[in-house]
Image (tube, helix red, strand yellow):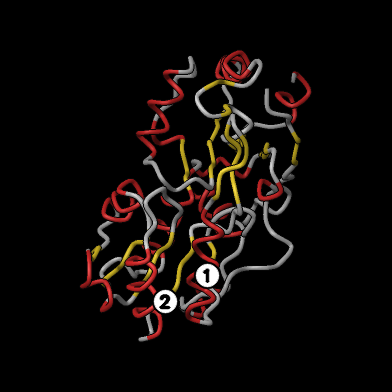
Amino acid sequence: MNRLLDRFDHFLIDLDGVVYLGDQPTLCAAETFTALNDAGKRRLFITNDPRHTAQGYATKLARLGIPADPAEFLTSGRAAALYLQREGKTGRPIFVVGSDGLRSEIEAVGGHVLKGNEGVTAEIVVVGGHEHFSYQELKIATLAIQRGAAFIATNRDANFPMPDGLWPGTGPIVAAIEVATGITPVVVGKPEKLIFEIALDLFPPAAAAPSSATGSTPTSSAGSGRGSPRSWSSPAAQRRRWPSGARSVPITLSKTSPA
């Protein structure tokens, strides 16, 4: 741990199976983050789970003995919202296949979210996993995308770890819409590069200092080798890369077994 503290100033940290498993903290999680705070390190918790807001995750970690500010969380849902904001698309009508938490994140950046059957007129469809996914949602999303709506997926995770096994994630829902429409979505969450670009933007300018990413699942690696997702952004935005001065930033992956 001391070697990591000496080498890095900023830490990108996964949540599921790394900080907690269900409602139980992993071994030494609280002590680890106390050490980070005591050493003056900056951290950003990153999760592909789009169901809850940053405030919800901050409340959960506080309950597990890990105090954290909501600003220290980047969910794939918040990342999708910030991506839409960055691309200047929040004013367009958006249909959300997902939880109230995902809708809240999109509305928080000024997103115009449609509800119910009016969703078929959406110009953007954002998809995140949730427990109440229905055929009605599938139908509305399919019709909107068939009519030309952009298809944005918060992530493609097939599942996520829980105490009784692996629960279905966002990936199966994305796959259903993809099969129904024949359209491949823009994917924002891990392991795609978009979420890591957004994460770096959330650190202060001095964040060109070395950073470390810690995760436990195949989607926890820092940036996919598959390249950047499709985008309908301007050519200037498409040329955007890591901040200047961040080219020497090493991103390391440390696999951690759930407690």
Location of residue 139 in the rendering, given as x and y in whole percent from the top left corner? 36, 73
135 and 73: which is toward the camera: 135
Residue designated by label 1: 186
Residue at disc 1, secondary structure: strand
Is 56 on the left-hand or right-hand side of 156? Answer: left
- Give the class, few, some or many, for how many residues have Cα within 10 Å of label 2's Cα (few <14, many ≥20): many
Location of residue 112 in the rendering, given as x and y in whole percent from the top left corner? 23, 64
Q: Quadrant of the C terminus?
A: top right
Q: Amino acid at mark 1?
A: Val
Quadrant of the rendered structure where residue 156 is?
bottom right
Determine the CA span between mark 1 and mark 2: 8 Å
CB under 8 Å between discs 1 and 2: yes
159 and 135: which is toward the camera: 135
Is 128 on the left-hand or right-hand side of 35? Answer: left
- Give the class, few, some or many, for how many residues have Cα within 10 Å of label 1's Cα (few <14, many ≥20): many
**Nearer-N-terminus badge (1/2):** 2
Quadrant of the rendered structure where residue 165 is?
top right
Q: Quadrant of the N terminus?
A: top right
Q: Amino acid at mark 2?
A: Ala
Residue designated by label 2: 150
Instruction: Name the residue located 42 percent from the left edge and 26 percent from the top edge.
Output: 60
Instruction: Name the residue located 40 percent from the left edge and 68 percent from the top edge.
Output: 87
Q: In the picture shown, does residue 197 fall above or below 162? A: below
Is 122 on the left-hand or right-hand side of 253? Answer: left
Q: In the picture shown, does residue 109 fall above or below 14? A: below
Residue at disc 2, secondary structure: strand
What residue occupies the far right of the structure in this picture? 3
